[in-house]
Image (cartoon, rainbow, N blue to C red):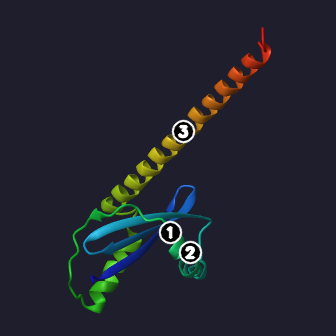
C-alpha cells in the first residue's frame, strides 16, 4: 500500500475564496475544488475538513511526479512561506480540475439529451392518443 499525501490550498479567486484539495496516492494526483464564499477562518476550514472531507468528489487521477526527500525544518518553513505568497494552484491541479469539469459537463449534456428525448416521445404518444380518440369508429 502506497503513501497518500493530501494538501489543501486556500486562495482568493475573485469574488470568492476557494479551496483546492490535492490528493496524491501511488504517483497519481486527483483534485477537488470547494468554494467557501467569504474568507474562511482556520477553525472553519478545519471543521469543513472534519465534517465534509468524505463528501468531496475528486477528479480522475492524473500521473504526477512524487519525490521523496526529507528537508530540514528551516527549508520547509521557507517553502511554506513561498507557497503561501504564490498565487493560484499548480498546473497539474488545474488540469485535473479541468478534466473533472469536462466529465461533469458531458454527463449533464447526456442527461439533458435523454430528458429531451423522453419528453418528445411522451408528447408524440399524447398526440397519437388524441388522434385515435377523435376518429373513434368512423
Disc 3 or 2, which lies upstream in sequence?
Answer: 2
Task: Give the residue furthest to the top.
Answer: 138
The foreground one among 41 and 85 is 41
Whole-percent x, y for residue 82 in the image: 34, 74
Q: Tag 2, which secondary structure?
A: helix
Whole-percent x, y for residue 41 in the image: 59, 77
CA gap between label 3 and label 1 equals 27 Å
Please tell me how many numbered marks the rendered image carries. 3
- Crowding around mark 3 (Cα neighbors within 10 Å: few <14, some 14 to 19, many 20+) is few
Q: Nearer the viewer, mark 3 or mark 1?
A: 3
Q: Residue at the spot x=63%, y=33% of the render?
A: 119
| Residue corresponding to mark 3 | 114
| Residue corresponding to mark 1 | 56
Whole-percent x, y for residue 33 in the image: 48, 63
| Residue corresponding to mark 2 | 52
The foreground one among 15 and 124 is 124
Task: Give the residue furthest to the bottom.
Answer: 73
| Mark sitting on residue 113 | none
Disc 2 to disc 1: CB gap under 8 Å: yes
Taking the image as shown, residue 36 lies to the left or right of residue 62, namely right
Q: Tag 1, which secondary structure?
A: loop
Disc 3 or 1, which lies upstream in sequence?
Answer: 1
CA gap between label 3 and label 2 equals 32 Å
Amino acid at each position: 500500500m502506497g503513501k497518500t499525501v493530501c494538501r489543501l490550498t486556500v486562495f482568493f479567486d475573485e469574488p470568492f475564496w476557494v479551496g483546492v484539495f490535492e490528493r496524491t496516492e501511488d504517483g497519481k494526483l486527483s483534485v477537488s475544488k470547494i468554494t467557501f464564499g467569504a474568507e474562511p477562518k482556520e477553525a472553519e476550514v478545519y471543521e469543513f475538513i472534519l465534517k465534509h472531507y468524505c463528501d468531496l468528489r475528486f477528479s480522475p487521477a492524473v500521473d504526477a511526479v512524487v519525490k521523496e526527500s526529507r528537508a530540514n525544518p528551516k527549508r520547509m518553513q521557507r517553502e511554506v512561506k513561498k507557497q503561501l505568497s504564490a498565487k493560484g494552484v499548480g498546473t497539474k491541479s488545474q488540469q485535473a480540475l479541468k478534466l473533472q469539469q469536462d466529465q461533469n459537463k458531458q454527463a449533464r449534456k447526456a442527461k439533458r439529451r435523454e430528458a429531451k428525448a423522453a419528453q418528445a416521445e411522451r408528447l408524440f404518444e399524447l398526440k397519437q392518443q388524441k388522434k385515435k380518440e377523435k376518429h373513434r369508429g368512423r
